[in-house]
């Protein structure tokens, strides 16, 4: 594989791995290149990402690589998050929010299992919007983060406590996560939540 193609594959893999990132060992194995050679390629990529024309960079956290935005652009991302648009949460975020509301405290992996797809972006969007928050860590291998709804969630949906959520038995007949989300949010008028991301 040519160097530039190898860089492109690495970039794509890191993007696809999301917030979990990927270890340099795993990357070298997947690409079938020596670990030392991979580190050299990643170092070259890091230098290229430092150029002003690039908006992302590679972060190496104890051997795990992540694609991240550049710290010097943070003020623009804050503006984006704080901007007052009239768009709503995506279906993926609504499904995730309904799962957290009814199953809290719950880990991201448990959310993934219920939805059948990765929920990293949806969870991050809900955290950014202040609708869910970390609620400690589960006593399990790796001590994963537990998520629950926030006071802002209650305010958005006009609830005084989580106990006011309608019982699932009233909302659905069949066990269907997407249906749960649709029926849950039909029960409450969803406000403008100012995001169009997952």
Image (tube, rainbow, N blue to C red):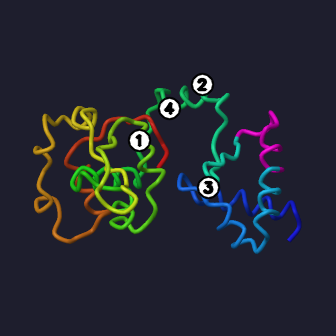
Front position in the image: 163 or 193: 163
Indicate which label's residue lies in the foreground, 4 or 1. Answer: 4
Which mark is drawn over residue 75? 2
On the picture, is 188 further left or further right than 195? left
From the top left corner, tell me how far across and down residue 196 is, in percent: 48, 43
What element does badge 3 sit on? strand
| Quadrant in which the N terminus is drawn | bottom right
Category of crowding for the residue at label 3, using alpha-carbon neighbours closer than 10 angstroms: few (below 14), some (14–19), many (at least 20): some
Distance between the alpha carbons at the discs numbered 3 and 4: 27 Å
Q: In which quarter of the image is residue 160?
A: top left
**Residue 45 drawn in magenta:** yes
Q: Earlier in the sequence, mark 1 or mark 3?
A: 3
Front position in the image: 105 or 195: 105
Distance between the alpha carbons at the discs numbered 1 and 2: 23 Å
Q: In which quarter of the image is residue 39?
A: bottom right
Q: Mark 4 points at which residue?
A: 81
Q: Name the residue under label 3.
A: 64
Q: Earlier in the sequence, mark 4 or mark 2?
A: 2
Indicate which label's residue lies in the foreground, 1 or 3. Answer: 3
Distance between the alpha carbons at the discs numbered 1 and 3: 34 Å
Category of crowding for the residue at label 2, using alpha-carbon neighbours closer than 10 angstroms: few (below 14), some (14–19), many (at least 20): few
What stretch of residues is rendered in magenta? Answer: 44-55
Residue at the image position 26 percent from the left and 49 percent from the top: 185
Distance between the alpha carbons at the discs numbered 4 and 1: 13 Å
Residue at the image position 45 percent from the left and 45 percent from the top: 124
Q: Mark 1 points at which residue?
A: 88
Category of crowding for the residue at label 1, using alpha-carbon neighbours closer than 10 angstroms: few (below 14), some (14–19), many (at least 20): some
Q: Is residue 32 above or below residue 102?
A: below
Category of crowding for the residue at label 4, using alpha-carbon neighbours closer than 10 angstroms: few (below 14), some (14–19), many (at least 20): some
Indicate which label's residue lies in the foreground, 3 or 4. Answer: 3
Q: In this view, does 166 lie above or below 50?
A: below
From the top left corner, tell me how far across and down residue 6 is, in percent: 81, 64
């Amino acid at each position: 594989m040519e160097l530039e193609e190898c860089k492109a594959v690495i970039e794509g893999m890191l993007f696809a791995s999301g917030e979990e990132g990927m270890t340099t060992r795993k990357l070298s194995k997947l690409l079938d290149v020596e670990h030392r050679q991979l580190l050299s390629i990643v170092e070259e990529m890091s230098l290229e990402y430092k150029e002003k024309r690039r908006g992302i960079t590679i972060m190496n956290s104890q051997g795990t690589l992540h694609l991240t935005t550049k710290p010097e652009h943070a003020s623009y991302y804050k503006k984006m998050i704080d901007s007052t648009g009239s768009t709503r949460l995506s279906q993926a975020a609504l499904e995730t929010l309904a799962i957290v509301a009814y199953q809290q405290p719950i880990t991201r992996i448990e959310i993934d299992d219920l939805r059948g797809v990765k929920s990293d972006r949806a969870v991050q969007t809900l955290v950014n919007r202040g609708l869910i928050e970390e609620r400690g860590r589960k006593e399990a291998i790796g001590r994963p983060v537990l998520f629950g709804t926030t006071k802002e969630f209650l305010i958005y949906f006009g609830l005084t406590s989580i106990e006011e959520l309608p019982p699932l038995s009233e909302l659905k007949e069949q066990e269907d996560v997407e249906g749960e989300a649709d029926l849950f949010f039909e029960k409450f008028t969803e406000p403008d939540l100012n995001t169009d991301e997952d």
